[in-house]
Image: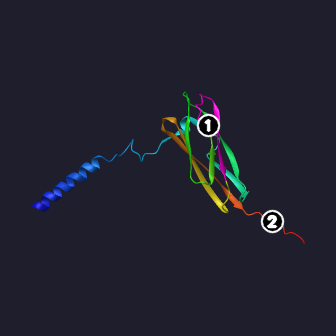
Amino acid sequence: MKKITFLLGALLVAGLVNAQTPTGQGSATTQSADATKVVEFSELDHDFGKIPQGKPVEYDISLKNISNSPVKIENVQVGCGCTTPKWKAGPYAPGESFKVTLGFNAAASGAFTKTATIFFNNGLSKVVKFHGETFAESTPATKN
């Protein structure tokens, strides 16, 4: 009898804990809304091509507010420490253009693909990518 009472109590506790776990819309696991409905992006995947290893590069993503309300950048989160974002929060008026600059230190050799997530007000975000390949520059031999 004690085992049955204990089992029923455990099931009750498990049910209560499960009822407190968020599911569906509005949960922390739900992705942010896509920002392409309010911001126009010049490109979403930039190709650096072949770049010398150890020589930092950067590129600008041009953005334009295509909505009827002001837009603010709340954060730009990069995937690793080899990527450096530069941006101004705004606000940017309807029709106004602005930019986000992404830099890459090119320290590692070989092919690379990196991402950055741009977070806007009103829960909007967009992931942008860049890729390419680094190569080691050969140094000419010195003559004695």
Amino acid type of the residue that numbered disc 1 sits on in the rendered structure:
Lys
- Residue 143 image point, x, y percent: 89, 70
Count the marks. Answer: 2
Q: Give the range drawn in magenta.
A: 88-104
Instruction: From this view, report whether residue 64 is shown above or below residue 57.
Output: above
Outermost residue toward the right in this view? 144
Instruction: From this view, report whether residue 25 is shown above or below residue 13.
Output: above
C-alpha separation, residue under disc 2 versus residue under disc 1: 39 Å
Residue lying at 17% horizontally and 54% vertically, measured from the top left: 9
Residue under pointer 2: 139
Instruction: From this view, report whether residue 107 is shown above or below residue 127.
Output: below
Residue lying at 21% horizontally and 55% vertically, measured from the top left: 11
Q: How crowded is mark 2: few (under 14 residues within 10 Å), some or many (20 or more)?
A: few
The quarter of the picture where the N terminus appears is bottom left
- Residue 125 image point, x, y percent: 52, 41
Q: Residues within 10 Å of mark 1 (few under 14, many from 20)?
A: some
Q: Is mark 1 on a helix, strand or loop?
A: loop
Drawn side of residue 144 relative to residue 60, left or right: right
Residue 81, by quadrant, is bottom right
Residue under pointer 1: 88
Amino acid type of the residue that numbered disc 2 sits on in the rendered structure:
Thr
Residue lying at 16% horizontally and 58% vertically, measured from the top left: 6
Earlier-in-chain disc, 2 versus 1 = 1
Outermost residue toward the left in this view? 1
Outermost residue toward the front in this view? 144
Magenta segment includes 124 = no
